[in-house]
Amino acid sequence: MEKLVLISFLSSIFAIGYALYLRWSVLKMETGTPKMVEIYGAIREGAKAFLYRQYKTIAVICTVLSLILYFVFDLGAGRALPLTAAAVLTGTFCSLLAGFIGMDASTSANVRCTAAAKKGMHEALTVAFRGGAVTGLAVVGSSLFGVTLLYYLYAMLLPGIPAGAKPLDPVLIVGLGFGASFAALFAQLGGGIYTKAADVGADLVGKVEAGIPEDDPRNPAVVADLVGDNVGDCAGRGADLFESITGENIGAMILGFVLWPVYGIGGIMFPLIARCAGIIATILGMAFVRPGPEETNPMRPLNMGLYASTVLCAVAFYILVQLLLKGNMGLFYAAIIGLATSVLITKITEYYTERDRQPVISVAKSSMTGPATTIITGISVGLESTALPVVLLTSAILLAYKINADPAYPGLIDPAGIYGTAIATMGMLAITPMILAFDVFGPISDNAGGIAEMANLEEDVRKNTDRLDAAGNTTKALTKGYAMGSATLAAFLLFSAYLTEVTHLSGGKVDLLRDGINIAKPEIFVGVFIGAALPFLFSSLAIKAVGRAAFQIVEEVRRQFREIKGIMEGTAKPEYGKCVDIVTKASLREMVAPSMLVLIVPVAVGLLLGAEAVGGLLMGATISGVLLAMFMNNGGAAWDNAKKYIEAGNLGGKRLPTGEKNPTHAASVIGDTVGDPLKDTAGPSLHVLVKLINTISLIFAPLFV
Amino acid sequence: MEKLVLISFLSSIFAIGYALYLRWSVLKMETGTPKMVEIYGAIREGAKAFLYRQYKTIAVICTVLSLILYFVFDLGAGRALPLTAAAVLTGTFCSLLAGFIGMDASTSANVRCTAAAKKGMHEALTVAFRGGAVTGLAVVGSSLFGVTLLYYLYAMLLPGIPAGAKPLDPVLIVGLGFGASFAALFAQLGGGIYTKAADVGADLVGKVEAGIPEDDPRNPAVVADLVGDNVGDCAGRGADLFESITGENIGAMILGFVLWPVYGIGGIMFPLIARCAGIIATILGMAFVRPGPEETNPMRPLNMGLYASTVLCAVAFYILVQLLLKGNMGLFYAAIIGLATSVLITKITEYYTERDRQPVISVAKSSMTGPATTIITGISVGLESTALPVVLLTSAILLAYKINADPAYPGLIDPAGIYGTAIATMGMLAITPMILAFDVFGPISDNAGGIAEMANLEEDVRKNTDRLDAAGNTTKALTKGYAMGSATLAAFLLFSAYLTEVTHLSGGKVDLLRDGINIAKPEIFVGVFIGAALPFLFSSLAIKAVGRAAFQIVEEVRRQFREIKGIMEGTAKPEYGKCVDIVTKASLREMVAPSMLVLIVPVAVGLLLGAEAVGGLLMGATISGVLLAMFMNNGGAAWDNAKKYIEAGNLGGKRLPTGEKNPTHAASVIGDTVGDPLKDTAGPSLHVLVKLINTISLIFAPLFV
């Protein structure tokens, strides 16, 4: 075991170290004109204000959580309180650390990307990609570090495990996943409310009331808007995937623990070592992102890196299966299924959301008959886009299970088959650093474009950043598809871990591994139904929260215009930080109701209807949450890109030849606005909900049996 | 048994007879001015054209279905082909007969309602309510007639049932439910596409291109539009509830058959006798709908009738439980739970969709900041509106089960408890004739208003019909809530019947009553997930179908304007029937893809993954279908009534004091248009999907085991 732990430690430190190296390589690049530096300073100041406030809030919540956990674990579940509380704190801390490194890097890379765009698109692309890779590696590295550290420490600390006996039950570090989940909920839901509230608030007062253009530095909320891009896509998605890989690691370790008689410590440590291999493979793959000076399509080098990482991961999985899993080829095939799923799900998402594909064009064309048809077509595209991913994800789960399960297994669910689905999930999550680099690439190039526009740089620079920005929109949509797919697999894994845990806790009295979760039982049917309704209510609350937070921004901007003389003349600097602080406070306050819902409902169902009904609830919430999230993410992205399709000069472009505004474009703008809170607030928060509800149930399981 | 069959027969004939009496009492009323008669004639002509074409299509489909069934049942499932085929035909025929009587009555009542409105609102209300009651009684009466006839005939025909032995297995008449389901899918989906396509098509060419006002008789599509109101709300919802009560009756009989050792023939026939009691109770309750000449609120007398029927039903259930179910009070409480659920679900729907309640006002207020916020708020209201009904429906199922189940029952699902949920469903469906009368009241008063407007009647008449129309909007929304709730319970019942049937068919080899449907098994998880995705894809197809059918109407109206000289001058009559025929053809053609999806997916899942996975599919489709339907129905109704709230003079009304159009109103119109295909096409069709998918699985069960 010690050797495997050491490898895991070294890899995690290598990942964080390489992230810091990339950060350094970005930081040493030039920052451009004083005007650019001024804007960049304001964005960084805003991001710091957000992080400061957010960390304060999370500290409070963590204390409350520890008290709740003390109460729960005092009920005699036989697990030591300080260890679980420490695990929750570690999970939260690691998630926040990764978020901090990532935010710091992306808010440093934006201005340098703008400066590099003066030399050419390929230079700018390299900066944006490296900036994104910092987040990718920091997230994966700190997750691996936390899991390895805790598992090793607890194995050392806990008495009663004689040498050579069964190792420590990984369920003891599940608090880590729970801490990560809670941090993710804050980061994703809070960040989602933040980014859209700032966006809408800035537009309403700036463009409509004061009559100043978009991204104008005189608007006190403009920085909050630019910060929002980082907060939602960088910190939010980072925490989302941090949670996925942490939850997946722990869930897979719990399942590996069940198979200890078969694979020994190798089966338990495999998830960690596979993560190490993923880190090495993606760092090597990053070397393939090497755009030449004559490159015109930013997606080409990015895709090169993705494919290279995927192939390297496949090779690594083959070797690791030989070394740690007794060469069981079924598990290798499962890993390949996971890798293939991750590539295919991004392709499907691409089809439904890319600017020049049929679905987006159909939304754009329907704008010719006004906003109502734009909305209707977008809704129908979003609804349709759920079908193929469901077929893909369910096939992946079923295949990975079937290949590895023993057909003659007497019980309901063969742990060997479930371990197969766990390995498939590992395969899917292996390329996470690359996918996250893709994702954070988005806000960096978006910010770079904004800085270029605000600093009045020459036309060529903006052309270069615009091309990156378009690619960034695609990569952002891909990441959401990937995050949603991995959330599904992670949730299925955590669900299986829940069944294992309840059976274990009840001492076999409630044997869910034998009885399963039987939907024909009325209690469980009720649990599934309530679980399925939860994402609907949650989304409704999240969407309403955006509206209320935006209203507070509007008030603050009006106040600054009224009280600070000289803003409009450019002689006084608006208080950017104040706006940022207000939207931060508002968004963190607004997320209380939805997050309490996620916490209270499973616990209430568990206390009223028992552990089995909670199992039903988990499945209901997972399935309906995933479907709603796809509907919202893809519908929203289709509206967004339909607008971009028209702005690219199709269907009349932004303005008619007469100089009048094109009503087709106006209709598409309404579609885009409708999609914003769906795709950037409610949709991505649902990924987190799906996983959080599973870790909550795992943590509170002792209460239900 | 013979005595119970006789009671059932006589009640069904009494219901149909009373419906015909009400029809006669409406027909003998005066029809008003020649202009009114002309418009009314056109609407009837259109309705006939629709029914003619629709019946032709259904005849073809029925033949194909019979062939498929021959093929299936030839596989040796042990059930006689001619009987099942005859059952399917009977179900289809009864559903169509009820639809015919209802459509005929409502298209006769509309003009008489207008004429009566000259004398006062109370007179008009009486006509509209009686017209609606015709459909209500015809639907319930013909369903009861069909079920009783078939069950009695088959019991006579089938050899091998010695006197005193266990009676005929009601599963043999399940084809009746399947026939009813297919007819309902055509009526509801086809009708839904029809009504919205005609609406949008008429508006686009009439108002926008030709510049003639809404409801102008020169517009060739205007009659199709008025026909559409009847087609969607009257025929569509009638078939929907026909399916619910038929499916519920047969499902409950199958469960009663399981309990034959306990209750004997009484348990099997109870659902039929309970229906008889419901018929008598609602006919008596209708006497309470007696508006005085000074009545100002049409909802007051309607609610009086509803409450009276509910109380009478409760009394009747008490007596029947004593007579037929050995005085088992648990089953009486279950019936009360069902009755209470039906009243509460209409109240919840009322809260979310009524014009002067907070949710609708919030949508209206959000229109002040433009169409995007209107849409976002409506989406959030729709999402939120799913929560309370889910809590209500699941509580009803669970309570009815728990009260009647034996806590010490050794198996997974106690048939006694499931029979309790069946009785709750009967309680919920007992007041169906009243609810349907409420529903059809809507299109009649809507049509009455249209006729008043087109015939240029005095202001007072229109004021009276407008008040009825507003009440009609509320009752239509209530009925959807009720239909959705009853679809949930009926689906749960059919699901239980499916478990029973598969166990029976496989001779215990696949014992779903013992094993249930275990969502922890990967195959079943996959089934649930695919089932849950089905309503999303189905809705997408339905919404797109509306767009394509509307396009064909636009083409036809343009052709008539071009080729028939004198339309615009009023010297030539447009070919209303042609427009109606085209939209009929288009809507029936457009519904092929969505309905094939509903047919093919469960059969494919059954063949590939087995009978258990189909069980999972049923649950997934039911839960996600119900949630999506509520989201669409309530969101759509909220948008509709937010527009009406503004048109009533709030938030600036239709026009500003300057005479300019009020942009707030314009935004609310966009919301209304977005909601139309959701609430009138996709949403209600999902009720049918939820039940059809259950009857399909029951019919094809022999293929899966």
Image (spheres, coloured by chain):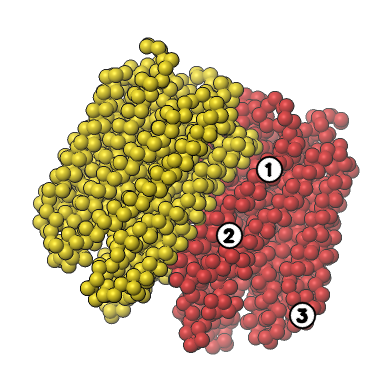
Chain colours: A yellow, B red
Determine which of the numbered discs, if any, sits on residue B120 in the image: 3
Residue B435 location, x and y as percent? 72, 59
Q: Residue at x 33, y 62 (%)?
A: A578
Q: Residue at x 38, y 60 (%)?
A: A582
Q: Amino acid at mark 1?
A: Ile
Q: Amino acid at mark 3?
A: Gly
Q: Secondary structure beneath disc 3? A: loop
In which quarter of the view is residue A273 placed?
top left
Q: Residue at x 53, y 55 (%)?
A: B383
Q: Evaluate whether residue B590 shows in this view.
A: no
Report in which chain the residue with disc 3 lies.
B
Q: Of circles 3 and 1, which is in front?
A: 1
Residue B128 against residue B86 in the figure, above or below: below
In which quarter of the view is residue A647 placed?
bottom left
Q: Residues within 10 Å of mark 2 (few under 14, many from 20)?
A: many
Report in which chain the residue with disc 1 lies.
B
Of the numbered discs 2 and 3, the one sitting upstream in the chain is 3
Nearest the eye: B11 or A545: A545
Residue A150 location, x and y as percent? 36, 28
Nearest the eye: A70 or A133: A70
Q: CA distance from mark 3 to mark 1?
A: 44 Å
Q: Quadrant of the N terminus of chain B?
A: top right
Residue B433 location, x and y as percent? 76, 58
Determine which of the numbered discs, if any, sits on residue B397 in the image: 1
Q: Disc 2 marks which residue?
A: B634
Q: Amino acid at mark 2?
A: Asn
Q: Evaluate whether residue B311 shows in this view.
A: yes
